[in-house]
Image (cartoon, rainbow, N blue to C red):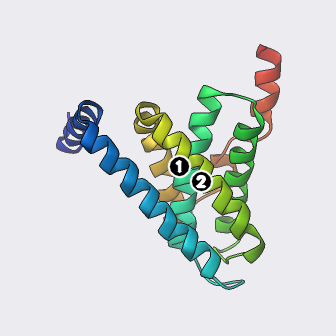
Amino acid sequence: MSTRKHHQTDRHTMIKSNPIAVAMAKHKMRSHLRTISIEVFLLQEGEFAKGLIAHIAWVIGLGAEIAAQTSPGTPEAKRLHSMLRNVVQLAIDGCAWRVELAEPIHQASQTACDLLITHADLAMACIPDADYIAGRIDNAEIQMSDIAGAEVYQRLEQAA
């Protein structure tokens, strides 16, 4: 086991067992998201925003995965998945900001944050996938095929 993984496991155990740590983690996540939301609304049309887009994809990607696992096929899960695909398209298009996406991204980020806080254990398990997507954006390697498409919903409907 790598030192990094061991450190993450220790942090995860500590957070689960310590109500003060849980409260601090929730506060830090909300504060961080507030900062991101402000930045989203301050960006100008066409402004280069690769770091922000990668981070937004990380947050919304986590939320989308949690929603897909806890409430698959629901409107909330579909909205988060759709917004993640929009954010990935921004990255594919050269990370040029689109002002009309500020409000929907803000709303999706808030929903994702609520899911991350409500389902912290599941969120911890999904972090490697979110890191992968954000890393692909940071390295300008992201492709739409990195994100599931509408076929996800067809499989859900067939399974039901």
Q: Secondary structure at mark 2?
A: helix
The furthest residue to the top: 160
Q: Residues within 10 Å of mark 2 (few under 14, many from 20)?
A: some
Q: Residue at x 79, y 31 (%)?
A: 153
Placement of the C terminus among the 4 image quadrants: top right
Residue 38 to residue 151: above or below: below
Disc number at residue 113?
1
Rendered location of residue 18, percent (x, y): 23, 35
Task: Looking at the picture, tell me which residue is in the foreground, 156 or 149.
Answer: 156
Residue 51 to residue 151: above or below: below
**Is any atom of residue 140 visible in this view?**
no
Q: Residue at x 31, y 50 (%)?
A: 24
Q: Contact, CB < 8 Å: mark 2 with mark 1?
A: yes
Rendered location of residue 50, percent (x, y): 55, 72
Rendered location of residue 12, percent (x, y): 28, 36
Q: Is residue 144 left or right of residue 114?
A: right
Question: What amino acid is at disc 2?
Answer: Gln
Disc number at residue 69?
none
Marks 2/1: CA–CA distance: 5 Å
Q: Secondary structure at mark 1?
A: helix
Placement of the N terminus among the 4 image quadrants: top left
Q: Residue at x 68, y 46 (%)?
A: 80
Residue 123 to residue 96: above or below: above
Task: Looking at the picture, tell me which residue is in the foreground, 77 or 25.
Answer: 25
Q: Is residue 135 left or right of residue 90?
A: left
Count of numbered circles in the view: 2
Disc number at residue 110?
2
Q: Quadrant of residue 14?
A: top left
Question: What amino acid is at disc 1?
Answer: Cys
Rendered location of residue 73, percent (x, y): 75, 30
**Is any atom of residue 81 visible in this view?**
yes
Q: Residues within 10 Å of mark 1 (few under 14, many from 20)?
A: many
